[in-house]
Structure formats: C-alpha cells, structure tokens
Amino acid sequence: MGSGKSTIGRLLSNELKLEFIDSDKVIEERAGANIPWIFDVEGEEGFRDREENVIDQVSQQDNIVLATGGGAVLREGNRRVLRERGFVIYLHASVDQQVERTARDKNRPLLQTENPRARLEELIRVRDPLYKQTADFVMRTDRRHPRAVIGEILKVLRKNRVLGPNESTLESR
C-alpha cells in the first residue's frame, strides 16, 4: 500500500502505449461495490477469492501493465501466474513512506485500525518475502519522482529483453 503501483503503472502504460489494468478497480467494477464494502460483506477471504479470479483472467491478456493489490501475493496461485505470465516489478516503499502516502485514504480496509503504522509493519513482515520471491526486479520508490522510477524501469525492461534495446515497445513476454 502506498508504494506507487497505480501511479507508476499508469505512467508506464502510457510510456509503452499499453493498456493499464488495476486489479482492484476490476474487482470493484465486477462487484458493483467498493473494496471496503466487499471486505465488510465477504471478509478478506471473499475478497481474495475475487482477486485471484481477476488476476488469473487479466494476466492472460497480452500487452498490458497490471497493478495488483498489495495482498495479491498472499495466494500461491497469484504468485505463480504473475511469475509465469509477466515481468514482475516489486515497487518497494518504506513503512514511513507508506504511512505518509496512505494517511488520509479511507478506502484501505486493512488500515482502518488504531495504529496503521503497526499494521503496515506487520503486513510488510509477512508480504516482503513473498514480493521478493515473485518479483523479477525490486524497485525502490521512496522519495523518488515517478518519472525517475519510470526511467529506471524502462532500463530494467531493456536489460531483461522485455523491451527492445532502443524501443518503447514490448517483446513477447
């Protein structure tokens, strides 16, 4: 949460002229309800079931940039399809940065607690190893301008032959 997935994903998709898909937005559109409502009615498990279904479906599309929710890595099925079907970049932000970026956001059910910092620390303790296991590359986003992050991502994509050497278009992957 608060690592820049939506912002960076949207900018990257614009740069590469690809469709941007935010799995959380797809879940909300299909459910006809926002994520806090889904959590309230179905619990986290119900939300994760929806999330796994959406990630499986959208990750089968070509030429997209996909931003998933931070908890997507909790399910092995999600980790597997993301590794198999794409080039995965873990946007890493410190807990300080996450607290700052999410302080006024009421659309994050897991942070609706007395101590959001403690919750974020617990989430990163559990999720960070899963992010690292799933990612092809880890990109730090703390206090970095989104354009600088995009520039570095493009270099990484070229180096890993996801992009052609002088191109902003994707090779097959």
Image (cartoon, grey):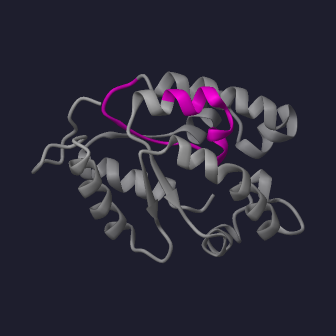
Residue at horizontal 60%, vertical 62%? Answer: 2
Per the rendered image, the range of residues in magenta is: 61-81
Residue 7 drawn in magenta: no
Question: Quick check: 168 left or right of 94?
Answer: left
Residue 66 drawn in magenta: yes
Residue at horizontal 70%, vertical 42%? Answer: 34
Residue at horizontal 57%, vertical 27%? Answer: 54
| Quadrant of the rendering where the N terminus is positioned | bottom right
Residue at horizontal 18%, vertical 42%? Answer: 169
Depicted 143 relative to depicted 4: above or below:
below
Question: Quick check: 77 left or right of 155?
Answer: right
Front-lying residue, 124 or 56? 124
Q: Where is residue 144 in the image (x, y as percent from the top left)?
A: 42, 74
Q: Count of labels shown? A: 0
Q: Position of residue 9 (x, y in %)?
A: 42, 51
The quarter of the picture where residue 72 lies is top right
Which residue reaches farthest left? Answer: 166
| Quadrant of the rendering where the C terminus is positioned | top left
Question: Quick check: 142 left or right of 146?
Answer: right
Q: Position of residue 30 (x, y in %)?
A: 62, 28
Depicted 29 relative to depicted 90: above or below:
above
Which residue reaches farthest right? Answer: 114
Q: Where is residue 20 in the image (x, y as percent from the top left)?
A: 40, 42
The quarter of the picture where residue 55 lies is top right
Front-lying residue, 13 or 74? 74
